[in-house]
Image (spheres, rainbow, N blue to C red):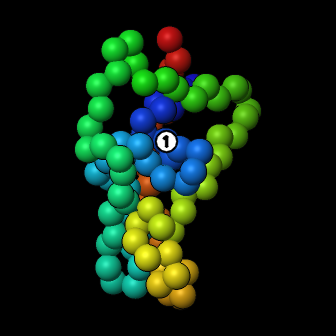
Amino acid sequence: MCVSGESWPNDIGGFDVSQESAYLQVDAQALAPSSSFSSVYCPGGCGEHRIAPKATLRRTINYATFGDAGTIAASPSKVLHFVATPYYCR
């Protein structure tokens, strides 16, 4: 299975491309992640993460991706809404 590089968090805990379906719910507020680009076109594709059978793909998403990290960390109620969409690798 594969997950596209642009739809998965990057090495520094953020997103390179805008993620419309991802948000962090803090108390009653939905915080959208910030990203470097609203969209991207990569001739030949932007890369992918290949997931071997029975393997796990993990990544950390920093609070700062969604706003003030200190304020978010201090909130007792946080829920991450993030959907990974895997596909069969080519």
Q: Which residue is mark 1?
A: 8
Q: Is residue 90 above or below residue 12?
A: above
Quarter of the figure with the N terminus:
top right
The residue at the point 52 percent across, 82 percent down is 70
Please name the amino acid that badge 1 sits on: Trp
Residue 27 visible: yes
Tell me: residue 57, above or below residue 71.
Answer: above
Q: Position of residue 81 (x, y in %)?
A: 42, 61
Q: Position of residue 76 (x, y in %)?
A: 53, 88
Q: Is residue 5 above or below residue 76?
A: above
Q: Is residue 8 left or right of residue 50?
A: left
Residue 35: x percent and y percent? 36, 51
Residue at horizontal 35 percent and vertical 42 percent from the top: 17
Residue at 48% from the left image edge and 67% from the top image edge: 64
Residue at point 32% right, 79% down? Answer: 29
Asked whether residue 78 is in view, the answer is no
63, 2: nearer the viewer:
63
Q: Quadrant of residue 45?
A: top left
Label 1 element class: loop
Answer above or below: position of 68 versus 53.
below
Residue farthest to the right, as pictured: 54
| 33 left or right of 69 in image | left
